[in-house]
Image (cartoon, helix red, strand yellow):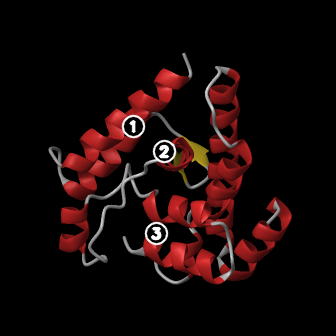
Amino acid sequence: MNFEKALSILKNLCPKNVVGHCLAVSEYAYELSLAIKNNGYSVDVELVRLGGLLHDIGRSKTHGIEHGVVGANILRIYGFDERIALIAERHIGAGITKEEAIKLGLPPKNYLPITLEEKIVAHADNLIFGTKRVEIDDVIKKFEKRVGKNHPSIIRIIKLNDEINSYLK
């Protein structure tokens, strides 16, 4: 499915602020993926661009932690590539472990980003507040307020940041 068709679906389902955020994440993720590809790594830049655009489509139904799972299901219903559905499912923070998923009431499985494309979108999403790009320190502060200073999700966010930056050197 092409970008314009995906954007049309997103606009039909989601409020303008979510669409704006998704466009900002898509743009940043696309920039990161191009830079990573130009450094010689194998990355599907169009998958990243579409995945970034559609990562928060689940916010059309809920703004809770389950929006990733809900979004993945919406994307499957619309016939999107499974790789895009998995980007939506695994984008929250730097992923959610099976143990955390059970505690959060999500279906019991790992929601950790696995592919480079999934990691790029999750990272770009972390660094976009609304439509504004922020620094990793801002992300850490935001998550510390939500989950506490020593939560394992913060360590995963820092590791993801370091991993993505290693591809950009």
Q: CA distance from mark 3 to mark 2?
A: 14 Å
- Where in the figure is residue 105, as x and y percent of width and height? 25, 78
Q: Which comes sooner in the sequence, label 3 or label 2? A: 3
Q: Which comes sooner in the sequence, label 1 or label 3? A: 3
**Mark 3 — residue?**
68
Relative placement, left or right, of 15 versus 130 is right
The structure residue drawn at horizontal position 70% and vertical position 32%, both measured from the top left corner, is 34
The structure residue drawn at horizontal position 53% and vertical position 79%, both measured from the top left corner, is 73
Relative placement, left or right, of 132 versus 34 is left
Number of marks present in the image shown = 3
Viewer-nearest residue: 43 or 3? 43
Viewer-nearest residue: 26 or 113? 113
**Mark 2 — residue?**
119
Relative placement, left or right, of 35 versus 154 is right
- Where in the figure is residue 110, as x and y percent of width and height? 31, 61
The amino acid type, in three-letter code, at marker 3 is: Gly
Q: CA distance from mark 1 to mark 3?
A: 18 Å
- Answer above or below: position of 76 versus 7: below
